[in-house]
Image (spheres, grey):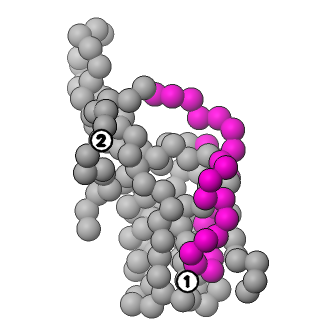
Amino acid sequence: MGILMPKKVKHRKWHKGRSNGVESRATEINFGSFGLKSLGTKWLTARQLEASRRYIIRYLKKGGKLWMRVFPDKPVTAKGAEVGMGSGKGNVDHYVYPIKPGRMIFELDGLKEEIAKEALEGAARKLPIKTKFVKKDNI
């Protein structure tokens, strides 16, 4: 598949913004039976998300379904090495998703609980935040 990035953005460069508070959207399991929930605040880069997505896909081996509840659409700019101060903002370097506590990152279905837990915990090791394995209530 390749690295995650938006096809088109309304504004090429964004302000940095502030990450605070807890998530109000996508806090429950809506699609699958098991999920990986964020417990921290951080910028998840497209590379980190892709690495954890690939880890889960390898675990699925043709069985089960994966939903990714986050998408990196925030552009992060960077200036080249040894470039002096001034002369404007740098070019877009990569894309991130600013995650807050309580957000569902991945959801899985069609697997046994032990296997789903191993897959999601392995994927969590690829991410820079603390996470929690959650199950749907009616299982």
State the residue at coordinates (30%, 50%). Answer: 6
State the mark number for residue 65.
none
Amino acid at circle 1: Asp
* Residue, disc 1: 109
Picture coordinates of residue 24, whole percent (x, y): 67, 49
Picture coordinates of residue 25, whole percent (x, y): 62, 53
Q: Find numbered disc 2 in the image and state the secondary structure of the residue it sits on.
A: loop
Q: Is residue 39 magenta?
A: yes
Mark 2–mark 1 Cα distance, whole angstroms, equals: 31 Å
Residue 101 in view, yes or no: no
- Front residue of 44/68: it is 68
**Image quarter of residue 77:** top left
Q: Is residue 49 magenta?
A: no
Residue 88 in view, yes or no: yes
Would you say 61 lies left or right of 114 here? left
In this view, 63 is above or below 18: below
State the residue at coordinates (47%, 76%). Answer: 66
Picture coordinates of residue 63, whole percent (x, y): 45, 91
* Residue, disc 2: 9
